[in-house]
Image (cartoon, grey):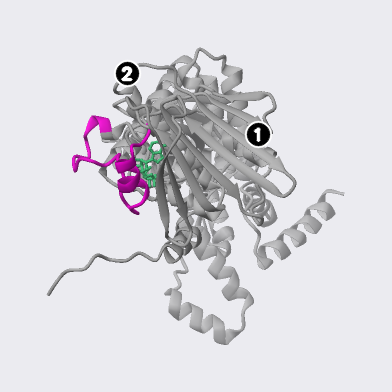
Amino acid sequence: MENSIFQVNLSGILKVLSDSLYSSWEVFIRELLQNANDAITARSLKESFKPVIEIDFFETGTSRVLQIKDNGIGLTADEMTEFLSKIGSSSKRNTSDMFDREQQSFIGQFGIGLLSCFMVSEKIEVESTAWNSTSTMRWIGNTDGTYAIEPTDYNGYTGTKVRLAIKKDIALTSDKLTFLLHKYGDYLPVPIKYSYNAGSEITFQKEFPWLTRSTGSEALMLGNRVFGERFSHYFPIQDSKGQTQGLAYVLPHRTHTTSVSKHVLYVKRMFISDSCGDILPDWAFFVRAILNSDNLSTTASREDIYHNEILEEVRESLGISIKKYLKRLGDSDPEAMQEIIVTHAQALKSLALEDDDFFAFIKNWFIFPTTQGDLSLKQIQQQSSSILFVSDLDEFRQIAPIARANNQLVINAGYIYDTPILLKLQERDHTGKTRQINPEYFGNILNDIDIEIYDLIRKRIDVLQAILIEFDVELDIKAFSPEHVPAMLHMSQDAIQKRDFKSIRDESDSLWAGVSDAILDFDPGFRAKLFLNYKNEIVKKLLYTEASKKIDPYIQMLYFNALMMGHYPLSGKELDRMNENIMILLNTNL
Ligand SMILES: Nc1ncnc2c1ncn2[C@@H]1O[C@H](COP(=O)(O)OP(=O)(O)OP(=O)(O)O)[C@@H](O)[C@H]1O
């Protein structure tokens, strides 16, 4: 059986390209610029010359003609047949070696880019004089899949001119063209000269700010313009080989770890995407980057990058670059570093919980509210021999004055992520310095009273304890500062939970109470611990007042007061009793 050659239905291919590959017809500008740029690169590998891309747009009545001319390597008649007339054939992929240096210097590789011109024009006209040749050839390709090649008069220069008559339904204006030339051509290594209706020329050529000695404000302005933000911090980043380089801008507002990161990416100085999310590690959600890469490859649509090992390496080393910067910033400008940490605290903490390396790197910068104000972990370590934390906000409020008076630094880890962060630290801290404060420890930082004194008041303590038993409170006596605090209540998380269940049970009907008792295996024992302060005058009065005096309302009020100081909600029973007591106290004292 004889083998036949595949026939290609060009209009079918064009439909696939315009419907599925390219995001819009506008990309034909990118493909033309890229071809011109690659042709210039190919010629510069052979000789030195002054490269230029010239673009002319002629608009008369309803006719619009776009002409793009380069002084690159050009095409011979054979090359026109081979590369322009065969879909998928490319002069830039002549070896199978992906690492071929010459091959790597081109942006194009797939041999389909030129077809994008059929989205905007019924006909593509290419006139070219190949390098070292004095004959000019013309190639005309049509959307019906036909093409023709013919010699034409020698035009006197080496290079290629592509001519397109723009279709009526394509909204290409001079302004739109200017915008697209800026978008795709600003940073190409070759100057682009643009002229409308043979008028004066505009030149497009810019340099990436990280490659110039531009001032910081220029770099900031670029970031602000590109991302529509008001950045105040930016820094250069690059991969380990220096082949992907750019600037990272720190977002000046909070963002969620799961928010989609959108970075601007150029490949070989050609704009690829302004919504590239994969180029930086996920944890770098708090920066936006503008990057140019010479080592990443684009997909055929040239609107995304290949997800391959090189991308993995680049992403990882850009991550290292960001970490290095933050480390340096931490040393050279701690205030700026703290500003970043404070703005992105929650997101950074949640990330540190998932990523051990990041945790190790960032932990010392985390800021926690403490009894001495907001302090970074580093400052806490400098000021205190231990890292003590309380997981509950109310518990913290209650102990803060005592801890302060006792010169004890305690972290309020009641805010989201703080307890898990500190528990992770505790897990990794083998010195035992990092500790979540539990009831035992809490009792220990308060001073015991002399045993002789305790013997004197033991009986009274028993009486007071008996009064409080109905509220499931365990009583203890300590001496602590400040003296004006008469009592302090400590409730563990467990105790708070049980207390909540208890109040539900007390307020619910008997059937539910029976069920909840059974489910919860309800423990009628002590739930909270009330520390009376022996240094406090009211407490002393209560301890030494004559045995006959009715002291129930006083000790109960100290308990209710401690509850309120700790921001614990009072149960219905406690509230009723407090109101009764207020009446009793008012009555006896008026
Ligand atoms: N301005 C030009 N000067 C010289 N040769 C050109 C020019 N434009 C196109 N060519 C030739 O035509 C071939 C096909 O171009 P086309 O844009 O379709 O694909 P490509 O650039 O090779 O790859 P890609 O599809 O990735 O863009 C190129 O490989 C090149 O040989």
In the picture shown, does residue 404 fall above or below 459?
Answer: above
Binning the other alpha carbons within 10 Å of mark 2 as few (below 14), some (14 to 19) or many (20 upward) gives few
Q: Which mark is residue 47?
A: 2
Residue 307 in view (yes/no): no
Q: Residue at x 69, y 33 (%)?
A: 197
Can you tell me whether the CB of the residue at mark 2 lies under 8 Å from the nearest atom of ligand 1?
Answer: no
Is residue 230 within the magenta segment? no
Which residue is more in the foreground, 439 or 381? Answer: 381
Where residue 333 appears, as percent x and y from the top left, is: 50, 17
Label 1: state its secondary structure: loop
Which residue is more in the foreground, 512 or 265? Answer: 265
Q: Residue at x 33, y 53 (%)?
A: 86
* Mark before the other along the chain sequence, 2 or 1: 2
Task: Please state the extent of the stretch shown in magenta in the rendering.
Answer: 74-102
* Residue type at the position of mark 2: Glu
Which residue is more in the foreground, 376 or 354? Answer: 354
Q: Which mark is residue 484?
A: 1
